[in-house]
Amino acid sequence: METRSLDVSLTGFGCTPTRAQVIVETLNLRARLTRAGIVLGAGLAVALIALPIPLVHFVLVPAGLLIGIVLAGMRVSQREIFSSAEGVCPYCGTHRRLGVAGRVFRLPRKVFCSNCQRALELGED
C-alpha cells in the first residue's frame, strides 16, 4: 500500500477557507480483497445467526447475504481511501480530525466539524 499526502482547502459557507492535511492510501489488490472478505464474512455471519430463528430467517438470511455481496463488491472497487484528514475549522478555529478515515477518496467531500457541528467541504485547490 502506498500513501500520499495532500494539502487541500477546507471551506465553509461565508468563511475564509483554511487548509487541511489529507493522507490518501492507495490499496493494492490484496488489501481490497481483504477488506471485501471482511464485509462478506460479516454478511455471512448475520445470515448464519438468523438461520435458526423462525420467521425472521425468511428475510434476514437473504438480506444478510445480499448486503454482504453488494458491499464486498463496492469495497473491491475502491482503489483509494482516506487514511486521515485534519484541519482547522473555518468557523470555530479549532484543529480537528475530519472523520473521513476509511472512506473512498473523492474530492470535493462534505464533512462536519465535531466542535461546532457545521457543514464544511474538503475541496481541491
Image (spheres, grey):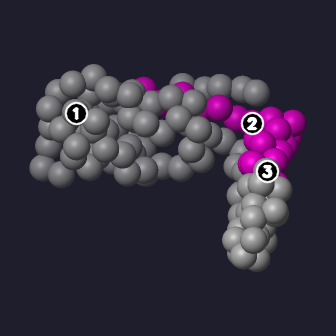
Disc marking residue 45: 3
Residue 35 screen position, x and y as percent? 76, 41
Residue 115 screen position, x and y as percent? 22, 33
Type of amino acid at the residue the image marks with label 2: Leu
The residue carrying pointer 3 sits among few (fewer than 14), some (14 to 19) or many (20 or more) residues within 10 Å by Cα, namely some
Under tag 3, what secondary structure?
A: helix
Q: Does residue 77 show up magenta in the picture?
A: no
Residue 18 screen position, x and y as percent? 25, 32
Residue located 77% across and 54% down the image: 49
Residue stretch rendered in magenta on the structure: 21-44
Name the residue beneath numbered marker 1. Answer: 115
* Mark positioned earlier in the residue sequence (1 or 3): 3
Q: CA distance from mark 1 to mark 2?
A: 31 Å
Residue 11 screen position, x and y as percent? 26, 43
Image height of 70 relative to 124, above or below: below
**1 left or right of 19 in image:** right
Under tag 2, what secondary structure?
A: loop
Q: CA distance from mark 1 to mark 3?
A: 37 Å
Name the residue beneath numbered marker 2. Answer: 27
Image height of 29 relative to 64, above or below: above
In the rendered image, which quarter contains the N terminus? Answer: top right
Type of amino acid at the residue the image marks with label 3: Ala
Q: CA distance from mark 3 to mark 2?
A: 25 Å
Q: Nearer the viewer, residue 25 or 116?
A: 116
**110 left or right of 92 in image:** right
Residue located 22% across and 43% down the image: 117
Q: Nearer the viewer, mark 3 or mark 2?
A: 3
Under tag 1, what secondary structure?
A: loop
